[in-house]
Amino acid sequence: MNHGRLDPKDLFGWQANASPDRLTTPLIRRDGQLRPCDWDTAMNAIVQRSRELLDSHGPSAIGFYTSGQLFLEEYYTQAVIAHGAIGTNHVDGNTRLCTATAAEALKESFGCDGQPGSYTDVDHADVIALFGHNVAETQTVLWARMLDRLAGDTPPAIVCVDPRLTPVARQATVHLAPLPGTNVALMNGLLHEIIEHGWVDREYIDAHTVGFDELRNRVAEFPPQRAAEICGVDADDIRCAARLLGTAERLLSTVLQGFYQSHQATAAAVQVNNIHLVRGMLGKPGCGILQMNGQPTAENTRECGADGDLPGFRNWSNDEHVADLARVWNIEPQQIPHYAPPTHAMQMFRYAEEGTLRMLWVTATNPAVSLPELSRIRDILAQTRLFLVVEDIFMTETAELADVVLPAAAWARKQERSPMPTAPCTSPKRPSSHQGSRVATWTFFSTMRGAWTFATRTAGR
């Protein structure tokens, strides 16, 4: 996948693995202070408190807040425990604050939060369009792959949508720099041109889409001149970009924070999907969409059900999906919470503030620093009625507020898997076998499942 290259984070990641500041032993709060303890003491404290809450308050008293920094086995084990064993709907990740737009746009367009593209499409596309994606600085290895194409015999055209003059913009065939907050108007203008000139695949549209007439009527209101006035770009540049997108034989599009962290984010990302749908540019080499993610395994959080959705992109509102997952887990369908949408992160903290959520397990993220309204979030985490478990490799600001701190193993001491855009899974080799007293995340949850002794269809409690 990397073609033998490393990006700056990979080059220096070993420093975190070997840092003297790493957590090395479990900690438990006693008399207001975090003190070292053994694993049995730490895990027994978690089991005891969680059992008390399940008996007195029910599953909704417990929540899980994770990140985009783990591996497949860890996310999936957490999903099994949270959704299947405990039965709580309070599961989410910090990916909610960075790439929730990617998930929602994919669901809205395709009914499923899965990437309809691959990094290998870079090698075959004749047009690569980057929407709010400064790949040269955010995914340097992927950018190097694109530069390989640009330096080759058949370089692709590059369409860059970014208000800044980034390294990608400097290499672009067409650079569109819209005013902040006008991405939807720009996308409407591009789609207007594509549809107006007949650069659409009617056979594909009729066979695989719905709502084309509504889309056509909507974007008809945005001819290039009007879009240009709204966005502050040249109308001829919109026409030129639309011609490249509309006449490409193999089109690859990527989207990232420039669209996700902007006005009408999901609508703008959906319009990128719509370009591919009206052109039939999916499912063929060089034809795909990459609604990118900001963290190493943010997509895996969603694939495995650790962000509130159910594993395998199953839909909580589809009874057949819930029944299928119950069959896989050997439990009754009613044990899996599907009475309402999964609880998003900020709502979980609101429940903790109100006192209905009494235990929160935070994994590999630092909400005491990263969430909005920091003073409020820190007050919530510091509540004596909230039992806070933090699992991390460092003593973070969130860990300092915890009742139990669990020292986690970092990637270099784990050999687990991560689904990737170029292959079903990758399994990094473990360069160090020394664990000390640190434990992989899935081991924590597996241990907890055994301690909780939850019921299945074939075994009692």
Image (cartoon, rainbow, N blue to C red):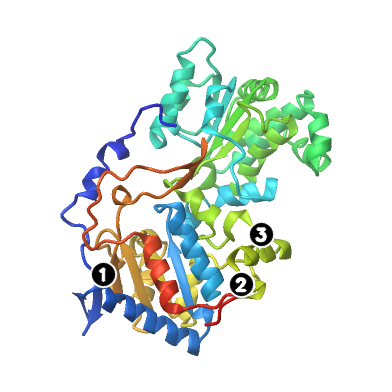
Residue closest to the eye, 129 or 15:
15
Please identify the quadrant where the N terminus is shown. top left
Mark 1 crowd level (few <14, some 14–19, many ≥20, 10 Å Cα): some
- In this figure, which residue is indicated by the disc labeled 2? 331
Q: Which circle marks residue 315 in the picture? A: 3
Place of residue 245 in the rendered image (x, y in percent of width and height, measured from the top left) = 65, 25
Q: Position of residue 382 (x, y in %)?
A: 33, 76
Q: In percent of the image, x 78 and y 35: which residue is there? A: 220
* Secondary structure of the residue carrying numbered label 1: helix
Residue 225, by quadrant, is top right
Q: Position of residue 180 (x, y in %)?
A: 53, 41
Q: Nearer the viewer, mark 2 or mark 1?
A: 2
Question: Do the residues under discs 2 and 1 have CB atoms within 8 angstroms?
Answer: no
Q: Nearer the viewer, mark 1 or mark 3?
A: 3
Q: Identify the residue shown where x is 37% and y is 42%.
A: 428
Question: Which element carries disc 3, helix, strand or loop?
Answer: loop
Dot 1 amino acid type = Glu
Q: Is residue 260 left or right of residue 395?
A: right
Q: Earlier in the sequence, mark 2 or mark 1?
A: 2
Q: Which residue is mark 1?
A: 400
Residue at x-position 68% and y-position 50%:
108
Position of residue 368 in the picture relative to residue 180 (left or right): left
